[in-house]
Image (cartoon, coloured by chain):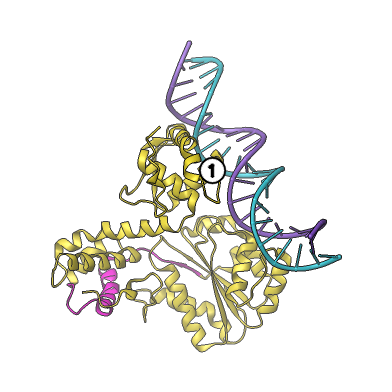
Chain colours: A yellow, B cyan, C purple
Amino acid sequence: MITNRGVFDDSYAPRNLLHRSAAVSELTRAFAPATRGERADNVLISGPSGVGKTTLARHSLGRLEARADVQTATVRCLDQSTAGIVRSVLEDLGADPALNTPLEDLCLALRERVDRPTVVVLDEAAELPETEALARLGDVDLLSWVAICHEAADWLARVDEDVHTSVMGHEVELDRYGVAELADILEPRAREGLRATAVTRSQLETISDTVAGVARAGIQSLLAAAEIATERDHRTIQDDDVDDAWPRARHWIRESNLESLPYHHQVIYELVRCDGPMSGSALHERYDEMSDAVYRGRQRTPIGRRARRDKLAKLREYDLIDVDGEGRGARYSVCDGSIRSPYDVGAVPLREY
DNA sequence: TATCCACCGGAATTTATGGAAG
DNA sequence: CTTCCATAAATTCCGGTGGATA
């Protein structure tokens, strides 16, 4: 059934972007100066997660690279400091700065590296725009950026005036796809990644409808439907396979989110999974009880309460933990109880005290 | 209803880590 | 080798807030 799993990877680049022609030409217009050896215009791409903001940026950059002598870099800005962002850009451009290089030196090195038009994608610049980092990048001749965020208005409200004016006229807003549009996008994926006639058009539309036009979710759901059909020995995808696809796809997404987090987060997660829904105070109490046992023999040592709140916030961000209520009365629970930490923190029986 | 207490989350401060300079 | 320095992560500090208790 599944002939090429790579087609369903987040990093897979489709040959052409369907239903995004206005956005593509907007980016092409912004990048035009780079084809003449000049600095390209800055761009702001906004929209909900999973609708192809990063894919759009990569696709447009790929086209630009094919016809102009430019450099590109892509940086994940989430939780990165100014120095961290500048360092990531340098690394993408082939430099290897030492861990303790001062910010000033990093900026100098960046100026040296950028000897031709260079476009930096600032991905996941979601909530907090790094204004300082933007200013530093703006100081470099020939360097321009494409910032990706959720809410354009929120983002713009926080940046400096000159940044504001620099993206004027180059703001691209992406929305969720319509049912038919997303089905159009899923069709070539099915053609390239699945056996012929494995799925019908109407099933693709059902998937698109279920995920409310979020492309990333739709693509994962299509893969999940194919996998479920295989398990059930169906020759092609059946409607009941489609019905069960989105829960499995969402499970995958959350699983990989949890896997990507460090040990402290996993401990907190397991705690909530085993004992939740629970209050903040109960969570702290349980942590204090079991932390000695769980951390014994490990590099890391238990963390304080304030740091635990930060881990908790991260887990919420990653759609792993749900918070019901606010402040003092908030109750925490895991979103999907069948997802366990790969670190197997749960090996320590939490209730045995 | 008034008071208390523990949590929340922003900001300042400290600690841990590791590369570079002397 | 020692000292210095920069970052990242964690702690300390603290004002705001909403349940709990009398």
What residue would you read off at disc 1? A302
In this view of the protein, which residue sits in the foreground, A259 or A64?
A259
The reply to whether residue A162 is visible in this rendering is no
Asked if residue A172 lies in the magenta stretch, the reply is: yes
User: Going 45% across and 44% down the picture, which residue do you hit?
Assistant: A268
Asked if residue A265 lies in the magenta stretch, the reply is: no
In this view of the protein, which residue sits in the foreground, A11 or A15?
A11
Q: Which residues are magenta?
A: A171-200
Q: Pinpoint residue B16: horizontal percent, then vertical percent.
A: 65, 51
Q: Pinpoint residue A72: horizontal percent, then vertical percent.
A: 55, 77
What amino acid does circle 1 point to?
Answer: Pro
In the figure, B2 relative to A226: above or below?
above
Q: Pinpoint residue A123: horizontal percent, then vertical percent.
A: 50, 66
Secondary structure found at label 1: loop
User: Going 50% across and 48% down the picture, which residue do you hit?
Assistant: A264
- Which quadrant holds the C terminus of chain A? top left
Q: How many numbered discs?
A: 1
- Characterize the local packing of mark 1: few (<14), some (14-19) or many (20 or more) Cα atoms within 10 angstroms: some
Q: Is residue A8 left or right of residue A262?
A: left
Q: Pinpoint residue A49: horizontal percent, then vertical percent.
A: 41, 61
In the figure, A27 relative to A68: above or below?
above
